[in-house]
Amino acid sequence: MRRSQGEENPIKSWFSIDGFTAMKWYWQWACFAAIALVLYIPILGNGFVNDDHLVIWKVCVENELNVDGFFRPLSDITIWITYQFAKLTPWPYYTFSILLHALTAVLLLQYCKKMLLDKMQLPNASLVVLLAAVFFLIYPYHNEAIVWILARCSLMAGTLAIASLLILVSSWSETRKMIGISLCYFVGLASYESIMILPAMLLAQLLISRAPFSLVVRYAVVLLVTFALHCWLRITVSGVFIGGYGKGFFENDLMSRFTGMLKTAGRIILPPSDNSQMLVVNFAVVAVLAIIAAVLVWRKTKKQVVLSRFFLIQLACFAFAMLMPLWLGVSTRTSESDRFFYLPAFFFCTILAFMVVYLFNSEKVRALVVLVLLASGVYLLEQNNMNWKRASDSVKSLMAQVRNSKEKLWVVNLPAEIDGAYVFRIGFSDALRLYGVDSSRVKVVSGLTRDQELLLPEVIVPKTAESISWIAPATLVLENGMPGGAAIAHTGKALKALTDSIMQQERNFNFADAAYSNQIQQFLLRNPVPAEELRIAVPEPGSRLLFWNRKSWIRLSY
């Protein structure tokens, strides 16, 4: 086997491109880990969010695998191990994900190196190898897998997928390769469903590389047996095959799903936007330019067998890896669910690096393009990191007040997310339990979705008149209770119960309550809200109300 460029020139500095690609993998990991830790400094101080609390309680406190419709024991096991020494200190959980992300970038570098540098010396091949890994390290649209503790399942599945591809191009014997790939695939399937498509990528690489058909069949059989074994284990343990994902497979009509696929495809390269039509238009423009660039690059490299095959393999793997996010969908308005892009990002970043290097002949132009891509990637990544920091800060602030309060608390506008970064869409009751808070003294009156937030001012200010307050978007606070002492209705029936109570006071000529009822009616007239969204809080004397004003938690006493 030929040595790589860097190994043939040992006097070259480690700080050169060839020198870096020739480094031992653990030195590359050290360098990438340092860069990743700097990039993700904003989230190292984050706390637990959303259903992190649910899984930590179930897996680490109750010592049970979380198999309620899912089968991701690898993620649960790593969380359990972290809990044994870190307990409820969050930063080790985040550090694990950051370091694993850096290692995954090294595996991508080694994979590209095996394909491009270990066969022959090719012009600028070392630059492609390094740029692919660096682009992946700073790629801004998959960092949910890194900054959300539970999303490490997607991260680990991606790591094992690229490890499988690296094994495939290694110098191992075919038998050892099959064993190694089978193990990676089996363990990866126990982490996240995105790796299910791995056999298609492996077989595509074998076919494009002109491997003997008999060898392709052997790999197919091994992978099929591995998948079948996993399916048996998954159904035996969890009772289902794909859990919650299966429900959404056929929800929409074909046209809606096709439109959603176009938007999702655009998100692999464009930032989220509330203007979905503009996103589609921008993607169409970018797609046309990308196709033109790909054709030009193909013409330049098609005579080089190694380069042309490498390019085709990356395109094929990218197409297969995109099947899951295209089908399940990724939010086009926020970063929600961008963990689905972790696997496609390997090949997207590799294709991007390949096209940048071989499209531009001028080194100055190429350097400028790389600089722009790196700068924009870091900027967008940090924007997303700050969303997760704000989400975490809101959780930490709320939980601090809940834990330190001895009074009964009424929580209004519990946010579901902050621009795609989860707060408490679920998991609040588990957070109370995890921190030893008596749930009977904490009442969640209303939640706050992002769609509701977009219609509100920058800061929510309560409207108050005597003993009645209105907290946008849909919470009525009645210090004196319901008119006539009526019971507080369950969610979704609050307006009907309130209306019935008001009408009853008027029929009974209970003038004091009728006047009170009239005030309530005026609030509802000035702040119209759909009946199913109205929430009512009736805080007892001595209790406190906490409401999210879009910036911080505000505490009101009664």
Image (cartoon, helix red, strand yellow):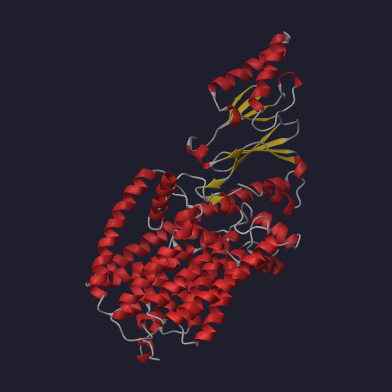
- Does residue 558 show up? yes
Name of the residue lying farthest toward the top = 509
Q: Is residue 7 above or below residue 67?
A: below
Please state which of residues 44 and 340 is positioned toward the viewer in this rendering.
340
From this view, report whether residue 27 is shown above or below residue 361: below
Tell me what residue is drawn at x 75 percent, y 48 percent.
Answer: 437
Task: Note whether residue 31 is visible.
Answer: no
- From the top left corner, tell me how far across and down residue 8 is, in percent: 36, 91
- In the drawing, does residue 87 fall left or right of residue 465? right
Q: Nearer the viewer, residue 484 or 322?
A: 322
Residue at screen point 29% across, 72% down = 357
Q: Quadrant of the N terminus?
A: bottom left
Quadrant where the C terminus is found in the figure:
top right
Question: Residue 273, how many percent across, how many down?
Answer: 41, 47
Residue depicted at 74% across the width and 22% down the height: 486
Q: Quadrant of residue 515?
A: top right
> Is 474 left or right of 503, judged from the image as shown?
left
Vertical position of residue 169 compared to residue 350: above or below: below
Q: Nearer the viewer, residue 156 or 550?
A: 156
The picture quadrant where one finds residue 156 is: bottom right
Q: Nearer the viewer, residue 141 or 347?
A: 347
Q: Position of residue 30 (x, y in %)?
A: 50, 77
Q: Is residue 219 above or below residue 553?
A: below
Q: Position of residue 510 (x, y in %)?
A: 73, 10
